[in-house]
Structure formats: structure tokens, C-alpha cells
Amino acid sequence: MMIKRSSGVLLHPTSLPGPYGIGELGQNARHFVDWLALAGQTYWQVMPLGPTGYGDSPYQAFSAFAGNPYLIDLTTLREEGLLQDSDFAALPGFEPGRVDFGQQYVWRNQMLERAYAHFAFGDAPALEPEFEAFKAEEAAWLDDYALFMALKAAHGGLPWNAWDPGSRDRVPEVLAAARERLAAPSERVKFIQFLFFRQWRALREYARERGVQVIGDIPIFVAMDSSDAWANREQFYFDDQGQPTVVAGVPPDYFSETGQLWGNPLYRWDVMERDGFRWWVERFRGSLKLYDLIRIDHFRGFAAYWEIPFPAETAIHGRWVPAPGHAMLEAVQQALGQMPIIAEDLGVITPDVEKLRDDFELPGMAVLQFAFGGGDFSVNDFLPHNLRVNQVVYTGTHDNDTSRGWWQHADEMEKHNFRVYTHSDPNEDTFAWQLLGMAQESRANLAVVPLQDVLNLGSEARMNLPGTTGPQNWTWRYLAADLRPDLAERLRGVTAEAGRV
């Protein structure tokens, strides 16, 4: 797949501004789309949109198919009659520049329960046919997810492998009784998913009408505590009690001396291959309903993955295990056609990963912040002159510091290498936009920049520090006043000069 020469901005919807403590899929999201169009940007890149659990990471969701209820725009629900003015009478104090996920978990879930109650009482009858159609269309994953969430609540929020054995092991008669007993909370879960998908589809259509496409992000692995793992247990390495025998991660690398112990269950690729990779076909089919382009996080795991025995304290003691990524992608392509995939090929990349990427003509990734480390940096693949045409270049990603923060904390060797390469001497006020310009001017067909770099923000605006569960991860939000028209004009100018408008 060859992407046309273009550019975009990386921003997760939770980082949008708004009155209720977290970004939503309403007017502020549409305003951001308008700003992107004004700035000459073709793409809005988001992180995974699934419902987050402990740690609030979008890469650890309760479902690979469901949407995040926190993103549902409450103002729209009020306009549709699903919420009343009285429902907003007692608002918590929201911090405008940060997400308090604990606060959202309590307050927003209460608001969504009220919205469902209004619907159940007949306050929005026009939505009933749409809701029934949605349930029928998405039943393949929605039924399991709704029951999973209802059972999880009934078990006090415990992970599925700590439930009673009948529910944990999906004993048919136990599940049949649970479906009857938990019919009301299951229906509420389905209705909330209906609201999310209805609003997301409307926002995506709004973006499409303005020439803005969405790059979505799917993690290669699913969360341990997810409806995917519970409902498809035979396709993962679990023991009889639902405990994983091996888990996912990466070996020591740039980010961590002990590697990253993600803890996700690992796929039984042999089982998946026997049924024609059905689960993967459906996962990609679902992603195509949400996104125009799909970035696969940790693409190298389709060639080989780092297997860590469970339990473990770090990711050091693991091994590389080959995966049948070629056969899987062929099965997906046969079922769905050529897929618009971006391969996140960062980290330990070996010839088999490159071959898998290139066999399917997938654009890989480059990060300019990684280009200036080491002694003989001139051979670094991420230097602008070494980039490929069929590639996506970033100043940094959600896992990096902001570019301003990177420059402030870079060691003297990195700064020296940058000065030598660019024949310049930037400071913390000018560096982010200089790096942004280098990404735009590179030969890579697609250049993506985090909004934090456009706003020239420091480390306080960093989205995530890999390998940690710190209280600042995933919480950053910009303020409405930050998205100035003059910034759009400046970004459009740089984009136009680089031939990307």
C-alpha cells in the first residue's frame, strides 16, 4: 500500500478539551477536525479506542472490538433527550488540562446509566430501531462483551479468571442462567456501545467531508482481562484455571534495561491457523468500520514475539518464538482485500520482520527522536536522508517525550549530532518546530506529528512513559485556547512547502 504524500497530527480523543473532564466525540472533536483541515492536514491519528481498565492505558482494553464509553459526548445525549438538565445539577470539579480517570469511572458511568434509564423509559423512541439494528449487526462480539462486563460487575470487578468456575470456564448452563439473570445490565452495556459507535461514525463522516481521514491503532495483543481472552480461551495459552502460562513483552531496549513486561496472553497460532485465522479476520473487519488506515502496534510480533514464562518480574528471561504472520495476513487479505495497514516496525527489527512488511508492501515507521544517538550516527536508519518513500515518519510518538522535552533532556552527544547534521544550533523554543519541519520535508510519504509538538509543549505534556503506570500517563489534555488559527496557518505553510497539502 502506497500512501500519497501527506501529513497528519497525532492526538488521542481523551486529550480533547471540554467541560466534563475528558475529551468527547462532540463539538470539540469537530472543532479539532476543522482545525486540521485549516492546517492542511490529511490525517488524524488516534490511539486504540477500546474501553480502558486498570492503569487507563488504551493499549489494555476490555475488548478489541468495543468503544470507550468515556468518549461519549454528553451534550449530544442531552440534545437527544437521553439526559435532562437535572442530570447535570451536581457536577464534580474537573481539572481542565488533565483526565482524572477515577473520577470519570464513577461520575460518567452514573451519567451513562441515567441515559440508558431515560431510553428504557421511552424518552428517545426514535433511537429504538437504530439500536436494534446495531445489536444485530455487531452481535458476534457484542453479546460476549456485554455479558462479560455484566459478569465482571457481578463479581465485584474481579478479572474473569477469578470468577466462579462456571462463569470463568463458560459452562453452557451457567452462562444461560447468567444471560437471564443479567439481562438488564447486559442490555445497558449494549446501549452504551451503540451510543459510542453512533457518535464515532458521525464524527468520522464529518472528518471525511472535510478531507480528513482517521489513522487508528490496534495493539497486536489483547488484554489479559478482556472479553476476547474470556470468550476465545482456546486461542490463547491458558491453564485449566484461566491463568496464562506465558505472556507478552519485549526484551531490554531503548526504553528499559529490563525490557517491558506487558503481561498480555499470547496467541496459540496453531489453533488460529486451523480455523483460517477467523478471529483476526473479524478484528480487521471491525477496525475497518472505525478507521481509514490501521497502524498495527508491535508489528514485529507477527514475525516473532517475545515469550515470557508466567509469572515473571521482568521481561529479561524470555525467548523469541516465530509467528505465522504471512499466512495470517494472506488470510485477512483474501477475506477483506488489500488492507490499509501501517506496520509499527520499531525496536528489535530482524530480516524476517522486514520481509513480512515488504512482502505486503506495508509502510513502516521512523521516529526522528531516535536518529541522533550513538557515536557514528550517520548510519542511523531514522535520519531524514535514510528514510524510505513508503514510510511514515514521526517526530515522536505517544511513548516518547515531547520534542521540546526531548531536547531539554537529550545528552550532549545527541545534541552535538543534531547540530552537526543540521548545521544549526536550536534552543528549546525552536527545536520542536525544526524537527517538525524535518519530518515534513523528508522523503517519507506520510509525516505525523503529535499535537504537543505543534503546541511546542514540554515534558509536562508527555502522554506515556513506557513500562510505568504513573498517575500522569494518558492524562494530558490541551485547552481550547491552545488551538489557535495562527498555528494552523503556520502548520499549513510548512505542509504546503513540503508538498503535502
Image: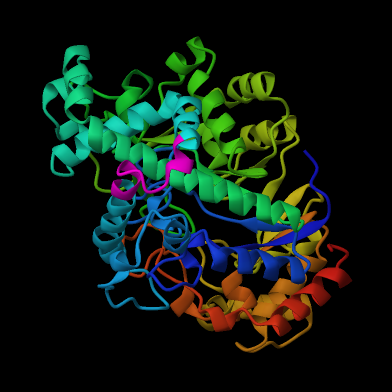
Report the residue at 51% width, 58% height from top.
25
Please check the rendered image and state whether residue 190 is part of the magenta-colored stretch, yes or no.
no
Report the residue at 29% width, 67% height from top.
86
Q: Is residue 249 visible?
A: no
On the rendered structure, is 298 left or right of 107?
right
Residue 477 horizontal/vertical position (percent): 47, 72
**Observer-nearest of 83 and 403:** 83
Q: In which quarter of the image is residue 234?
A: top left
State which quarter of the image contains the N terminus. Answer: top right
**Observer-nearest of 285 and 311:** 285
Picture mark count: 0
Residue located farthest toward the left when viewing the structure as drawn: 164
Please check the rendered image and state whether residue 124 is part of the magenta-colored stretch, yes or no.
yes
**Observer-nearest of 91 and 292:** 91
Residue 118 horizontal/vertical position (percent): 32, 49
Report the residue at 67% width, 24% height from top.
336
- The colour scheme applied to this rendered structure is rainbow
On the rendered structure, is 406 left or right of 497?
left
Residue 501 horizontal/vertical position (percent): 84, 63
Q: Is residue 289 visible?
A: yes
- Is residue 214 depicted above or below 240 in this figure? below
Q: Give the range drawn in magenta.
A: 117-128
**Observer-nearest of 304 and 244:** 244
Residue 498 horizontal/vertical position (percent): 86, 68
Q: Quadrant of residue 256?
A: bottom left
On the rendered structure, is 312 left or right of 316?
left
- Report the magenta stretch's main SS: helix
Q: Quadrant of residue 36?
A: bottom right
Report the residue at 51% width, 81% height from top.
458
- Is residue 353 depicted above or below 157 in this figure? above
- Is residue 127 depicted above or below 393 in this figure? above
